[in-house]
């Protein structure tokens, strides 16, 4: 049974990660030396993983024990690392004045990553604040 509530998140993931994947693949094809970094490879492969996971969320029941117990917590942890990798990679490209990477794809990666970091920070503050209030 298809989970129709996951179609919009899938499409958003497909769009954003498609942009990320397209950007790093183009850098590879251009043989952009200043973009050569292990983080470029991480972004390339993990963006594909995120697209596949998003697709799985459409077809796998939301209350699947395997999904709830293992896949989602692991994906959440890996996403934290991934966002850090994306921010640090784009920051490196900008600081090195890597001209062959200066496209709108880099800007999308940078601003999207900052937005996600801000959302994660707000979520963390809300959770910690809730815990503190409950203990008082």
Image (spheres, rainbow, N blue to C red):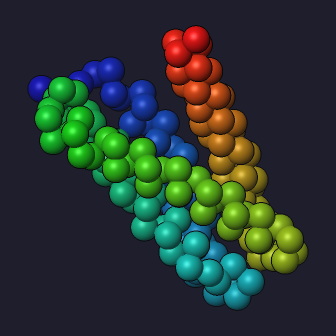
Asked if residue 81 is positioned above or below residue 45 in the image, the reply reads above
Percent position of residue 133, x then y: 59, 13
Q: Is residue 105 visible?
A: no
In the rendered image, the quadrant that contains the N terminus is top left
Viewer-side residue, 1 vs 121: 121
Task: Residue at 37% x, 48% y: name it.
Answer: 75
Task: Residue at 32% x, 41% y: name it.
Answer: 72
Is 87 displayed left or right of 49 in the figure? right
Task: Residue at 77% x, 76% y: name it.
Answer: 100
Q: How many marks?
A: 0
Q: Is residue 109 visible?
A: yes
Q: Residue furthest front?
A: 136
Is 98 displayed left or right of 49 in the figure? right
Percent position of residue 110, x then y: 72, 52
Percent position of residue 32, x then y: 69, 83
Percent position of residue 22, x then y: 55, 62
Asked if residue 94 is positioned above or below residue 78 in the image, the reply reads below
Viewer-side residue, 128 vs 114: 128
In the rendered image, the quadrant that contains the C terminus is top right
Viewer-side residue, 36 vs 125: 125
Task: Residue at 46% x, 42% y: name it.
Answer: 13
Asked if residue 7 is positioned above or below residue 37 in the image, the reply reads above
């Amino acid at each position: 049974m298809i989970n129709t509530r996951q179609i919009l998140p899938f499409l958003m993931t497909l769009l954003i990660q498609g942009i990320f994947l397209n950007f790093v693949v183009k850098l590879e094809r251009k043989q952009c030396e200043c973009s050569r970094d292990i983080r470029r490879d991480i972004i390339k492969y993990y963006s594909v993983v995120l697209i596949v996971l998003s697709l799985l969320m459409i077809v796998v029941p939301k209350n699947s024990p395997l999904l709830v117990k293992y896949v989602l917590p692991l994906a959440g942890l890996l996403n934290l690392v991934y966002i850090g990798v994306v921010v640090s990679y784009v920051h490196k490209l900008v600081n090195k004045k890597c001209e062959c990477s200066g496209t709108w794809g880099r800007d999308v990666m940078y601003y999207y990553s900052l937005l996600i970091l801000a959302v994660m920070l707000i979520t963390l503050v809300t959770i910690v604040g809730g815990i503190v209030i409950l203990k008082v």
